[in-house]
Image (tube, rainbow, N blue to C red):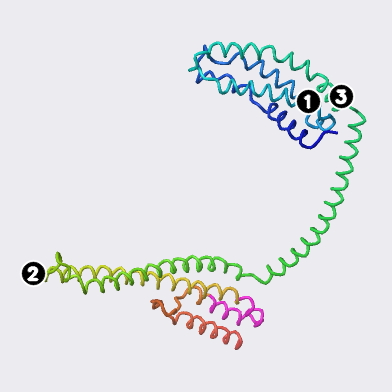
Amino acid sequence: MPTDTTLQECTQSLTRVQQFDAKTLSREADLGTQLSFSEAVAPAEAIIAVYKRIPLSALPDFSDTQLNVINSQAKSDYNVFKQILDFSATSNESHDVRISILNAIKVRRDQLFDQVWQFVAYGVARITDTSLLETQARATIQTIEDQSAELTAHLTKAKADADAALAAIRAVASEQGVSQQATYFKTEAKDQDALATTWLSYTYKFAAAVGIFAILSMFLHKITWLKPETNAEMLQLITSKFLIFAVLGYLLILAAKNYATHKHNSIINRHRQNALLTYRALVEAAGDKGTEDIILAHAASCIFSPQETGFAQSKGESSSGSKSVLELLTKGASKAGE
């Protein structure tokens, strides 16, 4: 049995040669037609084909000595490939080196086969060995059976879990009704809250800018090149301060208003979400058709009517919801009298 180090090294060398692309040896694009290695592509492919006939699965069956033979041959041929890839036409002896490499690679396939033919033969015999194939087939079948049994157990458990989940989903779905639409208002509330946070940070920044400029403006007249000498210069300095304060103040007010607006929208959507989430529970608790209409009117009023939030004043009419409720109560009383 081979040692782990020898087996690993031989596996790496053999894999590297087997996966090598012989077409990269041409180098016609950078060396030109006369100095290219186009003639080496076909011999290199033949060499690589010999290595591919040695299966990697057969390497553990060889001894260290045999693996060293394969390893040395693979490294030697890869070194030739690397010489072609590293070949430079600027060398004084480039022509002779190119001819030498081409001559060597053209006869290399037969030399290689003389060295590794027994390993190729063993690999082919190992692959076509019926007893080995039978053993592998039995092992594969047993593995499939074990995995099938395990998979069946998982599927059975998954089916039980799925049935339980389906029952829970049906129970939840029967309770959701209108309230399942609350997710839209929840998403919108989150978006508006994120925008409110952004504008709040702008408000802090503009407020800090106003404060900093207010402090700096107290000392501007003491700066030599800003110190007013005449009444006109003093008026100009005062006007400049006023304009800067006006701009910063306007930006501060604008940021604060945007913050209040988005916070207002966030709270309104939270109200709408809560109205939809509690609608079904209130309807089921009431159990009366007339009461259900009243509760629905209240929920619709909460969703579609502006809400007082403390950040912005609603411009809608707050009496519309009460009016619809009174109308429903009147209709309910009329039906009861009939």
Task: Measure the alpha-carbon separation of dots 3 and 2.
Answer: 107 Å
| Numbered circle sitting on residue 229 | 2
Residue at 57%, 69% in the rendered image: 182
Q: Residue at x 58, y 84 (%)?
A: 332
The earlier-in-sequence mark between 1 and 2 is 1
Mark 3: which amino acid?
Ala
- In the drawing, does residue 17 fall left or right of residue 331? right
Q: Which mark is residue 171?
A: none
The stretch of residues the image draws in magenta is 279-299
Badge number at residue 54: 1
Residue 270 or residue 179, whichever sits in front: 270
Picture residue at 37% right of the left edge, 67% below the top: 202
Secondary structure of residue under mark 1:
loop
Which residue carries the number 3 mark? 125
Would you say residue 282 sits in the magenta stretch? yes
Cα gap from disc 1 to disc 3, whole angstroms: 11 Å
Based on the displayed image, in which of its 4 quarters is residue 156 positioned? Answer: bottom right
Going by the numbered disc 2, the residue's amino acid type is Glu
Query: Residue 277: x percent and y percent?
Result: 60, 74
Q: Nearer the viewer, residue 254 or 288?
A: 254
For the C terminus, the image quarter is: bottom right
From this view, report whether residue 175 is shown above or below residue 102: below
Tally the marks. Answer: 3
